[in-house]
Image (cartoon, coloured by chain):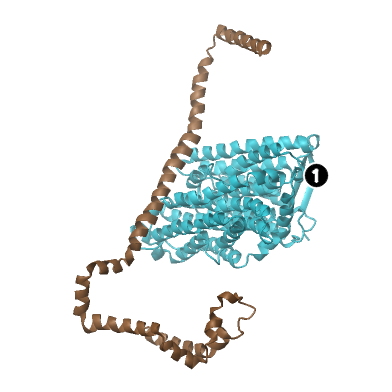
């Protein structure tokens, strides 16, 4: 029935239209704005499900394609489509937005309509980024989503929100400028803004390296990679729970997605030449940031640093591919690395969202993010404690949870590239266990040190729904990652074949 | 409280072990499922001396490991329950050994001093010196401050005096002409 519908256009524009509609309730009924946002986000999530059900896993080409001229004089097109890389990220976006709307239900009392509208508009922008196949359209959505996030942190954020928003905006905007220059350069070479045309563009090594670096600045900031990561802890700490969830679960993935969609296929030779540099930065992120996470006293800051460390696996998986291809040991190492990268991105989406939402649950009750403010939470909130421990274990990478699958695949692939890379990456499992379980010990277990903690009520029905749905996916992906991996096989294999061929 | 469940668990454990030891360890139950290199096949070595569950148990009971373990239990019972004075005197005479054993050969102290304090020190150092001072303080906020200083200095160039602007223009034209003519 939905086969002939412009599904992607609906998924891009419906959230934005809903956002505008919700904005009409500004200053009127907050409850109406909440319900309208929930209905809209649920409808958009349901509408995104056919992307998964009708997706042809055997095909590596773009699916659900919509292509129309937009600015014909500059060959700018309205060009949307998804493949095995972008489709899971679109679904992750629609799912996460429902949770964010639910999470802000009772908590956001001021300017509720504007808050909900900002997230709905952001949802459309984020889906647009994942689905855009025209570079200008991609840039439009990639930059556009900064505005609602800027407002979310700036209006509903903590005491240092202005500093955090400025830092977030300038960092990410600075990175994107270089990407725009690279896109314009490629337009003059290809006479088209189609990303698929860019993939076929013959480029010499100097061009490739410059374009690679331009993309790297943009995407490294977004992921974020060391040493351009310091905006993220500040943004997370100051952002409201919903903002942190979207930042960690979706926005960071834009960086990883960008590298997969642009850097690897457009500049494969530069990626190969610079693979050691990228692997070094990834390992620094994994280990260095792990140690930094260990000494954080603010729970949100700790999880923010943990996110940077986990995203190190994403970039590691992408660039060990080139080492594996240079010295092939057995079959499938390159595909394993890239699939591990993708699974890690989706898994991190669920786990980081869960961690931030769990911290939000505690913050709503005690209005503190400091670890030292808690202790013995299990005595007053046993159900919450169960969920928190599960998500913490997933964050550590415990087998049976989604956190294990991606990291294991990337470590396994790294082993095929170089033993020492795999060993260094595997260190993160120990460091991750140290900072996460130490936090769990100090927050959840032990004696109740503050009287307020003993008065904290356990999860309400709304919070139970949020926690349960995330726990479901964390475990499902942990014990049965095959459906997700199947979606990616054809696309990843095609990408591996593409980057194995030199453009020189 | 746990005695009865433990007894109840031990009965099927003995029965299952008795029945399953031969097909599981030395039979074909895992054939084609678990692959063992012929050079590392310890179970095949043991299997060559296997003559049924009863003889296996008897053979096990006759091994030095079992007698040493039994002797350990007996010694512990004698020194702590029967003649506690022996344990007390041994504790006084070999206090250093007692301390060493109680502290687990000092591994816990070593782990605490090296791994725990070392990791926390490293993390604190990386965060405060690298993240906060070098990256945030010098590179990020430093850039912002430099732009501010540059703007502060350069705004003085805008004096509003016509002859200043005319001088800069004439000097610039002269510099460009020099560059074009002589370089």
Chain that appears brown: B
The image position of residue A166, as x and y in percent, is: 52, 37
Confirm whether residue A25 shows in the render: no
Q: Relative to residue B152, is residue A455 depicted above or below? A: below
Tag count? 1
Q: Using residue A502 as the reference point, say whether residue A468 is left or right of it.
A: left
Quarter of the image where the N terminus of chain A is located: bottom right
Q: Residue furthest front?
A: B39
Which of the pair B180/B1 is nearer the observer? B180
Which residue is depicted at the point 55% across and 52% down?
Answer: A245
Which of the pair A333/B172 is nearer the observer? A333
Which of the pair B174/A453 is nearer the observer? B174
Q: Relative to residue B68, is residue A48 depicted above or below? A: above
Which residue is depicted at the point 37% across and 53% down?
Answer: B117
Q: Using residue A85 as the reference point, say whether residue B149 is left or right of it.
A: left
Q: Quadrant of residue A208?
A: top right
Q: Quadrant of residue A197?
A: top right
Residues packed near mark 1 inside 10 Å, few (<14), some (14 to 19) or many (20 plus): few
Q: Secondary structure at mark 1?
A: strand
Chain of the residue under the numbered disc 1 shown in the image:
A
In the rendered image of the structure, the colour used to display chain A is cyan
Quarter of the image where the C terminus of chain A is located: top right
The image position of residue A130, as x and y in percent, is: 68, 49
Confirm whether residue A380 shows in the render: yes
Which of the pair A143/A261 is nearer the observer? A261
| Residue under label 1 | A68
């Amino acid at each position: 029935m939905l086969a002939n519908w412009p599904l992607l256009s609906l998924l891009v524009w419906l959230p934005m239209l809903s956002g505008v509609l919700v904005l009409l309730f500004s200053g009127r009924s907050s409850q109406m704005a909440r319900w309208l946002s929930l209905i809209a986000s649920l409808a958009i999530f349901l509408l995104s499900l056919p992307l998964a059900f009708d997706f042809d896993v055997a095909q590596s080409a773009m699916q659900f394609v919509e292509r129309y001229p937009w600015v014909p004089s500059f060959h700018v097109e309205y060009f949307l489509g998804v493949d095995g890389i972008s489709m899971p990220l679109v679904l992750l976006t629609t799912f996460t937005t429902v949770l964010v709307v639910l999470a802000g239900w009772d908590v956001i009392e001021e300017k509720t309509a504007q808050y909900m509208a900002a997230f709905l508009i952001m949802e459309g922008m984020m889906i647009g980024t994942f689905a855009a196949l025209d570079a200008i359209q991609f840039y439009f959505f990639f930059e556009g989503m900064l505005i609602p996030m800027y407002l979310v942190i700036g209006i509903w954020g903590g005491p240092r929100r202005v500093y955090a928003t400025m830092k977030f905006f300038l960092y990410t905007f600075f990175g994107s400028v270089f990407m725009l220059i690279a896109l314009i350069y490629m337009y003059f070479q290809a006479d088209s803004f189609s990303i698929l045309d860019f993939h076929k563009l013959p480029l010499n090594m100097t061009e490739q390296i410059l374009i690679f670096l331009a993309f790297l600045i943009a995407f490294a900031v977004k992921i974020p990679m060391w040493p351009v990561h310091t905006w993220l802890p500040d943004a997370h700490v100051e952002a409201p729970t919903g903002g942190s969830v979207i930042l960690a679960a979706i926005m960071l993935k834009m960086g990883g997605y960008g590298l997969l969609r642009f850097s690897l296929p457009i500049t494969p030779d530069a990626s190969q030449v610079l693979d050691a540099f990228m692997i070094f930065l990834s390992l620094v992120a994994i280990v260095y940031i792990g140690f930094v996470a260990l000494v954080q006293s603010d729970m949100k800051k700790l999880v923010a640093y943990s996110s940077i460390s986990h995203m190190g696996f994403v970039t590691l998986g992408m660039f060990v591919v080139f080492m594996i291809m240079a010295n092939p040991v057995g079959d499938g190492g390159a595909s394993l690395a890239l699939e591990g990268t993708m699974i890690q991105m989706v898994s991190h989406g669920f786990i980081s969202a869960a961690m931030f939402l769990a911290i939000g649950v505690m913050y709503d009750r005690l209005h503190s993010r400091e670890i030292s403010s808690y202790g013995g939470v299990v005595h007053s909130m046993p159900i919450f404690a169960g969920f928190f421990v599960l998500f913490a274990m997933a964050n550590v990478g415990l087998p049976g949870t989604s956190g294990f699958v991606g990291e294991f695949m990337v470590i396994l692939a790294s082993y095929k590239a170089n033993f020492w890379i795999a060993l260094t990456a595997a260190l993160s499992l120990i460091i991750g266990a140290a900072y996460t379980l130490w936090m769990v010990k100090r927050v959840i277990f032990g004696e109740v040190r503050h009287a307020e903690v003993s008065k904290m009520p356990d999860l309400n029905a709304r919070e139970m729904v949020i926690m349960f749905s995330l726990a479901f996916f964390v475990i499902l992906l942990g014990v049965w990652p095959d459906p997700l991996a199947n979606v990616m096989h054809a696309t990843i294999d095609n990408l591996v074949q593409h980057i194995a061929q030199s453009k020189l | 409280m746990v005695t009865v469940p433990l007894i109840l668990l031990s009965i099927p454990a003995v029965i299952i072990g008795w029945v399953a030891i031969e097909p599981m360890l030395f039979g074909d139950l895992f054939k084609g499922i678990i692959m063992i290199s012929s050079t590392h096949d310890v179970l095949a070595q043991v299997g060559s001396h296997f003559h049924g569950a009863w003889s296996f148990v008897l053979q096990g009971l006759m091994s030095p490991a079992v007698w040493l373990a039994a002797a350990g239990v007996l010694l512990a019972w004698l020194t702590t329950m029967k003649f506690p004075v022996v344990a007390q005197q041994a504790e006084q005479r070999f206090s250093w050994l007692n301390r060493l054993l109680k502290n687990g050969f000092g591994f816990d102290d070593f782990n605490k001093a090296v791994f725990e304090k070392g990791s926390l020190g490293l993390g604190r150092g990386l965060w405060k010196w690298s993240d906060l001072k070098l990256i945030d303080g010098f590179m990020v906020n430093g850039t912002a401050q430099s732009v501010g200083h540059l703007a502060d200095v350069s705004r003085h160039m805008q004096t509003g005096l016509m002859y200043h602007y005319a001088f800069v223009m004439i000097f610039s034209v002269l510099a460009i002409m020099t560059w074009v003519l002589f370089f």
